[in-house]
Image (spheres, rainbow, N blue to C red):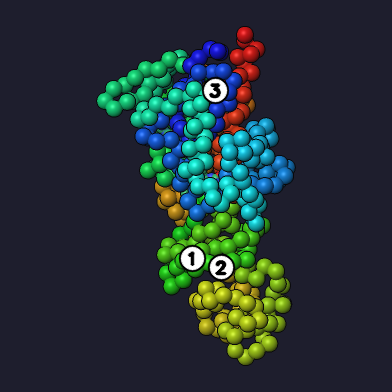
Amino acid sequence: MYKSPIVIIGAGPAGLMAAQHLAENGFEVHIYEQNKAAARKFLVAGHGGFNLTHNESITDFITRYDKSELSPIIKDFDNQDTVQWLHDLGIDTYVGSSGKIFPIKTIKPIHVLQAWLDKLNSLGVTIHYEHTFQDFVEDTVFLKHKEDIVAIKYYKLILALGGGSWQKTGSNAQWIPILKSKNIHIKPLEAANSGYNTKASFVDIEGQIVKNIEIRFNEIRKKGEVVFTTYGIEGSPLYYLNRFTRATAFPFTIYIDLKPNNSEQQVQKEIASTKNITKALKEKLKLNNATIQLLKKLPKEAYTNPNLLAQYIKNYPIEVTSFRPIDEVISTAGGILFEELNPSLNLRKYPNIYCLGEMVDWEAPTGGYLLQACFSMGQFAAKHIVKSQIITE
Ligand SMILES: Cc1cc2nc3c(=O)[nH]c(=O)nc-3n(C[C@H](O)[C@H](O)[C@H](O)COP(=O)(O)OP(=O)(O)OC[C@H]3O[C@@H](n4cnc5c(N)ncnc54)[C@H](O)[C@@H]3O)c2cc1C
């Protein structure tokens, strides 16, 4: 048994992954979690498809992140390692049509989590629930448990406290003032993988999906589908756009190409081929009802003029006014700056303390990239602790 204990705060995917690798390598590991249950956001991520990673070459994979510091970390434990790790837990996976990797259909998110918790239990990892991180000094961390403050000695401390969305899952970013008081620089959290509020109202087409479109903002383009809502628009190409629009002040205009596989001339020709515009849109251009309703919002002179209408079909403008509220978005950007961390993810100012997962300042689109980074960071920090222990032995 190596020097111990390793104390991990936060029983989300990043913390649990670090715990597994450390316990497999002979460390005594204690996880402290403020909720009464582990990994609530991990379970939420499973609503509507548990997209655990993505099937693409590692060269493409690492380009999905906004911070190059993550590249060696993701390469060290990559998407194929995640698939193997899941397989070892008894969770088989399949690759969906868009390249996203999911557990096979009969396996529910709770089954994945339970298999993982069983594995940790078999390795001797203890999870202490209802313990809330309060403060730390060089070798001791302080946690609130019910009405008491408990002091826990650590050999290494791993903080894996998450970002700031979906507070009801426990990711409430209450760690920010604690780390700030230790002079750790933190970029303010912002909505990421967020829909946009729009100036125009789409209440009449709320819930309707327009598929096979391309979103454009300056030179950035992303294909996919959008969903119209009571407040604006949602959808993975918009989430992808988030980081590129972040530096631009609201309001600004994004454009939807509603027929990305056709040129403007082709679109114009199809519209002009019959006198009934709506019939041409439906039958020649195969646009669905939601798209036609969207186009009917244009001034009448645009809808009835094939040249103008073709221009709008290729460049439908949407003025966006803000991101959605931070609590309802899929993830947050911002967090502990990489400059505060050594490459092995421990704090430069407190080398015995590691920071992992969404609490660090990086962002990525949906598609399994968020969880993959959390898994990879957990592995990376744990491997560093194992290696440093072997060297000092
Ligand atoms: C609706 C939704 C859908 C998503 N879908 C996907 C998806 O399909 N694919 C994907 O890759 N990602 C998805 N994500 C994102 C993914 O779930 C997160 O990025 C990931 O869970 C972050 O992991 P983490 O370990 O860093 O933090 P978290 O999962 O947030 O875990 C942090 C843990 O720390 C605990 N904690 C926080 N503060 C304290 C404290 N002060 N004291 C003690 N404990 C504390 C929390 O209670 C929590 O258990 C989704 C997220 C949401 C909200």
Depth check, front residue: 379 or 84:
84
Q: Label 2: how many residues lie within 10 Å, few (<14), some (14-19) or many (20+)? A: some
Disc number placed over residue 89 in the picture, else none: none
Distance in Å between CA atoms under marks 2 and 1: 8 Å
**Circle 2 sits on which residue?**
210
Residue at horizontal 58 percent and vertical 41 percent from the top: 91
Q: Is residue 361 visible?
A: yes
For the N terminus, the quadrant is top right
Instruction: Identify which residue, 83 or 169, lies in the foreground.
Output: 83
> Which is more N-terminal, label 1 or label 2?
2
Q: Nearer the viewer, mark 2 or mark 3?
A: 3
State how far apart marks 2 and 3 are (Cα): 48 Å
Point out residue 223 in the picture as x, y percentages from the top left corner. Answer: 64, 60
- In the rendering, which numbered label is found on residue 228? 1
350 up-or-down from 325: above or below: above
x, y (%) of residue 327?
41, 47
Q: Earlier in the sequence, mark 1 or mark 3?
A: 3
- Residue at image coords 64%, 13%: 390
Q: Which mark is residue 23?
A: 3
In the rendered view, would you say 198 is above or below 343? below
Label 3: element kind: helix
Q: CA distance from mark 1 to mark 3?
A: 47 Å
- Say left or right for 359 vs 392: left
